[in-house]
Image (cartoon, rainbow, N blue to C red):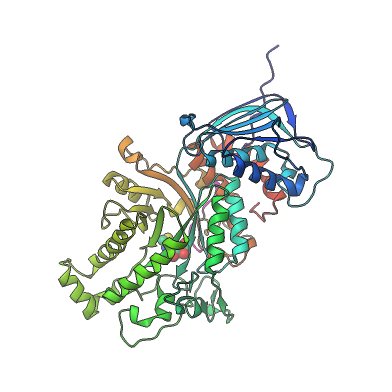
Amino acid sequence: MPAPTPPALPLVPRPTRAHARGGRFTLDAGTGVRVGDGAEPAARMLRELLAPATGLPLPPAEDGAVVLTLDPALTGLGDEGYGLTVGPRSVLLRAAQPTGLLHGVQTIRQLLPSEALSGAPRAGVRWSLPCAEITDVPRHHWRGAMLDVARHFQPVEYLRRYVDLLALHKINVFHLHLTDDQGWRMPVPAYPKLTEIGGHRSRSPVGAEGDAYDDVPHGGAYTRAELTGLVAYAAARGVTVVPEIEMPGHARAALAAYPHLGNRPGRTLDVWTRWGVCDTVLGVHDEVFDFCRTVLDEVMDVFPSPSIHIGGDEVPVTEWATSPEAAARVREAGLEGPGALHGWFLSRVGAFLIRNGRRPVAWAETGADLPDHFAVMAWRDPAHALAAARRGLDVINADHRRTYLDHPQRGGAQELPAQPGAVVTLRDVHAHDPVPEGASPEAAAHVLGAQAQVWTEYATTPARLEYLTYPRLCALADRAWSGPTPWRDFRSRLDRHLPRLDALGVPRHP
Ligand code: TNX
């Protein structure tokens, strides 16, 4: 009789290679962890993640049945890969780099009964995992999720939970959209009014028509200590926080605080109370670049991320086209017209970041007006990602039709308020190939990965954010870590993953 096919391992994202073996390994009060050099952070994370539900102490022990080791010679595993062998009497987790161990710990967690993810003690559960042999290396290095805390502010405690959920899915970039027309959330000591004034708006639109308001003031800002704490918290979970400061557009909150940075001397502005694209943009005079450098110095001080996002999207030239100062700048820089100030502005600020050892990232179309050292976050059209990669720019594929989780996940009145516009289904997200169709191997090598976006015009609370984020982010994580997986395979793994989200109390979309 042929041996029964072992059940597929219900992991999200799907590992590169995984074989279930017969039998199970059980963790109990006596299980110890043998912790190799450099594996302490992973051991700590394993203990912290499992303690609330299981109460297991998992103490360090020389003869522990759970073994965590770092071996830099395992170069095939790269910076983030890991190997996991679960036998009836031992669990062996190996990686070349510490981040690989962290990802492996998330896999161990997913292999346990879903109750293991609960935040409260669960009695009467046998904490066992199936025997298996797994080798797992991510397909893409940038597996991101962007959260917009400018349109609706969320406290830092919530951002930590958001990071926890990203780490569960091996998402390694948390892109924090810190500023926009409707709010500035990061303190900069040299410009205190950015948060004092720019951190508050008098009201917000209600409904999608844009002509009704709630008359409820909205505001908030982080402290520097909260942000540095978040960076450390995320790093301990294998997640890099990539900050974004929007310029030269989506900057109305900054202009409300410091009107002299704009294009109309003497004008005062409010922090914007509408959604959409705002005509008011930063000016192009020298003080503006002093401001950008000072802000970005503080940003680099708080965020060690190799990449710094400087916005760049949706910049109307209305004001530049009629500003004498902008006209003078166009002449002096030998530009074709005010439209060329966009690329000129971003190149200048980008060059400053590069001099400081960071890589500028921008929401851009083809990147045609950006110098080579930029990474492009392509969002508007799939053709843009291809054009940018062909030009030799690094690309993060954030195609709005596949990755904008602020859009509803299905049509119909049963949905919570979401961005008006196209529906982005779970299947759309799962079908999102970070590598654009038609890319040569050279162009494909410039695709860093994919990212999901949660803009928050309509996502006012953590519950709404999570309803929009899950389970669609599971699909993005699968695609970005594993590459293409058959839809039905993904669906069946997801069905067994949803109880984990439920155990974590995620108010996900059904
Ligand atoms: C476009 S995509 C924007 C955001 C909005 C979003 C709504 C991009 C870089 N800009 O300002 O929040 O659409 O879906």
Q: Is residue 208 left or right of residue 301?
A: right
The answer to whether residue 53 is left or right of residue 156 is: right
Instruction: Indicate whether 272 appears above or below 493.
Output: below
Residue at the farthest bottom position? 266
Residue 229 appears left or right of 436: right
Ligand 1 lies in quarter: bottom left
- Foreground of the two, 52 or 385: 52
Is 285 part of what is drawn in magenta? no
Q: What range of the chain is rendered magenta?
A: 419-427
Q: Position of residue 320 (x, y in %)?
A: 26, 75
Q: Position of residue 71 (x, y in %)?
A: 52, 31
Picture quadrant of residue 40: top right
Q: Quadrant of residue 247?
A: bottom left
- Residue 9: percent from left, percent from top: 64, 32
212 and 363: which one is in front? Answer: 363
Q: Residue at x 59, y 29 (%)?
A: 134
Q: Can the viewer see residue 248 in this picture?
A: no
Q: In this picture, is 407 found above or below 62?
A: below
Q: Is residue 272 above or below residue 82?
A: below
Q: Main secondary structure of the magenta part?
A: loop
| Residue 15, position as x, y percentages in the image | 56, 34
| Residue 420 visible here | yes
Judged from this view, the residue extending furthest toward the right is 124
Q: Which residue shows up at 34% across the image and 59% down it?
A: 353
